[in-house]
Image (spheres, grey):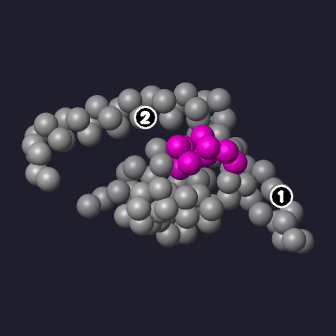
Amino acid sequence: MNVKGSLPLLVLDALSKGSSYGYQIAKAIKARSGDVLSFQEGTLYPALHKLEKGGLIEAYTVTVDGRRRRYYRLTEAGARALNEERTTWFTYVQAVNALLGDAQ
């Protein structure tokens, strides 16, 4: 199944809980999904850069133990986009569930 299309929504949701850095975002998504969803750096960082370029998140640098770490936070536009995307996602899920029925 292609879950890459859901990654921007999942990143925005993760950042709605507070600022975070790439590895921590991936770890949170994996943990909150019960280890079902896992995204590698090659998928996650391009998504973060695209969201940043689109103005939905912004990056800043923090020095931790002498090392620079790039953190991301949700912008106001990102919070609005998250709400819109959540609504779209739940409409999509309802439609797919209606087509597939109760398979469980």
Q: Quadrant of residue 86?
A: top left
Q: Secondary structure at mark 2?
A: helix
Query: Crowding at label 1, few (<14), some or many (≥20) Cα neighbours within 10 Å?
Result: few
Q: Residue at x 72, y 54 (%)?
A: 71
Quarter of the picture holding the N terminus = bottom left
Tag 1: residue type? Val
Q: Which residues are magenta?
A: 11-19
Magenta span dominant secondary structure? helix
Q: Quadrant of residue 65?
A: bottom right
Query: Crowding at label 2, few (<14), some or many (≥20) Cα neighbours within 10 Å?
Result: some
Q: Residue at x 84, y 66 (%)?
A: 64
User: Is 62 or 29 nearer to us in this picture?
Assistant: 29
Q: Residue at x 26, y 40 (%)?
A: 93
Tag 2: residue type? Glu
State whether residue 31 is above or below residue 48: below
Q: Which mark is residue 62?
A: 1
Measured Cα–Cα span from mark 1 to mark 2: 29 Å
Q: Secondary structure at mark 1?
A: strand
